[in-house]
Amino acid sequence: MEDVAELSPARARERFRAGERAPTAGWCRGWTQANLIAVPAALRYDLLLFAHHNPRACPVLDVGEPGAWSTALFGGDLRTDLPGYRLYRDGRPVADLGEVTAEWREDLVPFLIGCSFTFERALLAAGVPVRHLELGTNVPMYVTNVPCRSAGRLSGPLVVSMRPVPEELVGTAVEVSGRYPRVHGAPVHVGDPAGLGIGDLARPDFGDPAEVRAGEVPLFWACGVTPQAAVMASGVEYAIGHLPGHMAILDARDDDYRVG
């Protein structure tokens, strides 16, 4: 059986195209993963401006032309080569799909947004545990009460991902992730989830819960699901995103996004 950590991006995309469905944390060690959001061309500049206004949550790695289903950093087929998709109509999630060939409109512009999975290997190398990798589950993600800066017709709340970190390693986690500013960088919040309006860590809005154990502190990173929250909050008439945690695996290396 193949070790998913050792797969090439092309081989992983082949498996997803063939019907495999799984969160991608831990897949393709050393290769960059990205969030997908595809919006009608009439909204592409609004989304670009929204990303510019909210760079921690929406670091744009690549953008395709209207109707395109590949980009410079993604050599596969964006309609079939992710392990899961979410379809939106009028701001509502209406279907979770394994592929979206029939749903991919000629006016859709695909955006690939940085993902915090990119710095998880560096966290592990620095001795910082990553709970969802230990458990083989999806990372927990939460919609916060923090508003993003609006742009044109787009507005919405910040979404965050959470990783529990031993108290003595919080500084290390902040420093290591901070070296990856184009894939969310350092945490936006450390400690009490109530500061972000999160009432119950055991009930994430996306992904799976991750227990915060004695002596651990929850760390919250801006999350690339934020554009999907904006699609919902803004009532966007049509959009396609990745199923949260089920990412696009790029033909780019994690180290391409490391600074310092």
Image (tube, rainbow, N blue to C red):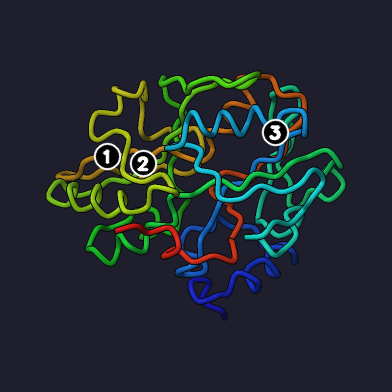
Occupied quadrant, residue 133: bottom left
Q: Name the residue rendered at 25%, 51% in the picture.
A: 173
Residue hosting label 1: 218
Residues marked 1 and 2 touching at CB (< 8 Å): yes
Secondary element under disc 2, as helix, strand or loop, is: strand
Secondary element under disc 3, as helix, strand or loop, is: helix
Residue 216, how many percent across, how many down? 19, 44
Q: Name the residue rendered at 77%, 53% in the picture.
A: 69
Q: Name the residue rendered at 69%, 23% in the picture.
A: 91
Q: CA distance from mark 3 to mark 1?
A: 34 Å
Secondary element under disc 1, as helix, strand or loop, is: strand
Disc 3 marks which amino acid?
Arg
Residue 143, how many percent across, how many down? 46, 28
- Can you name the residue that lies furthest to the bottom here? 1
Disc 2 marks which amino acid?
Met
Residue hosting label 3: 44
Q: How many marks?
A: 3
Q: Earlier in the sequence, mark 3 or mark 1?
A: 3
Q: CA distance from mark 1 to mark 2?
A: 6 Å
- Can you name the residue that lies furthest to the left here? 168
Q: CA distance from mark 3 to mark 2?
A: 29 Å
Where is the N terminus found, in terms of image quarters?
A: bottom right
Numbered badge on residue 162: 2
Disc 1 marks which amino acid?
Pro
Q: Name the residue rendered at 67%, 60% in the picture.
A: 72
Q: Earlier in the sequence, mark 1 or mark 2?
A: 2
